[in-house]
Image (spheres, rainbow, N blue to C red):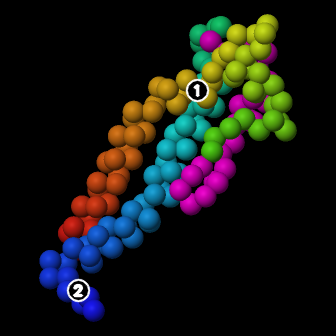
Amino acid sequence: MNVGCDITGWKLKSRAVRMELVKTIPKVVEQSSDDVLKRTIRNVEGSRYLPGTLPVRMVTHYLAKSIKRIRISWRLMAVFADKRIAHYGKYVHDGTRNLLPRRYLGDVITERRQALINNTKYVFLKAIRKVGRV
C-alpha cells in the first residue's frame, strides 16, 4: 500500500499550472491566428502606393475576402484561402507552370514565426507566474 503525502505542495502547484495553461492556450492560439490572418490579408491587398507589389494583377479583393480562419480544436486554428470564394488562391500562392508563386500566407508565417513563438512563451510564463503568486 502506497500512501503519499504532498508536503512540498508540488502536486497541487503543478495541477494549478496545468489548469492555468489549459485556460491560456485558446487565448494564445486566437491571438496568433488573428495576427496571421490580418497580416495575410494586408499582404494580399498590398500597398496602393507601391505598384507591382500585389500578388495578383487585377485587384477584385476576392482573394482577400477568401482568407478565413477556423478553429479545428481548442488548441488549433487554421488560416487558409477559401476556394469557394477565390478558387485561384492556391495557384497564386503555390504557383503553376506558367505563374511564379506569390506566397502571401507563407511569407507571413516565415516573417512572423519567431515573434509568434516569443509571444507564446511570454504569455505562458506570465500565466505560470500568476499561479505562483496565488
Taking the spot 83% from the left edge, 30% from the top edge, the residue there is 87
Callout 2: SS = loop
User: Where in the figure is residue 19, as x and y percent of width and height?
Assistant: 39, 70
Image: 6 above or below 107: below
The spot of residue 6 in percent (x, y) is 20, 82
The quadrant holding residue 102 is top right
Q: Badge 1, how many Cα within 10 Å: few under 14, some, many 20+? A: few
Identify the residue under disc 1: 106
Q: Is residue 126 above or below residue 19?
A: above
Q: Is residue 122 magenta?
A: no
Is residue 92 left or right of 4 when viewed as pictured?
Answer: right
Type of the residue with mark 1: Gly
Residue under pointer 2? 4
Q: Residue at x 73, y 20 (%)?
A: 92
Bounds of the magenta segment = 53-77
| Residue 46 appearing in the image | yes
* Quadrant including the C terminus: bottom left
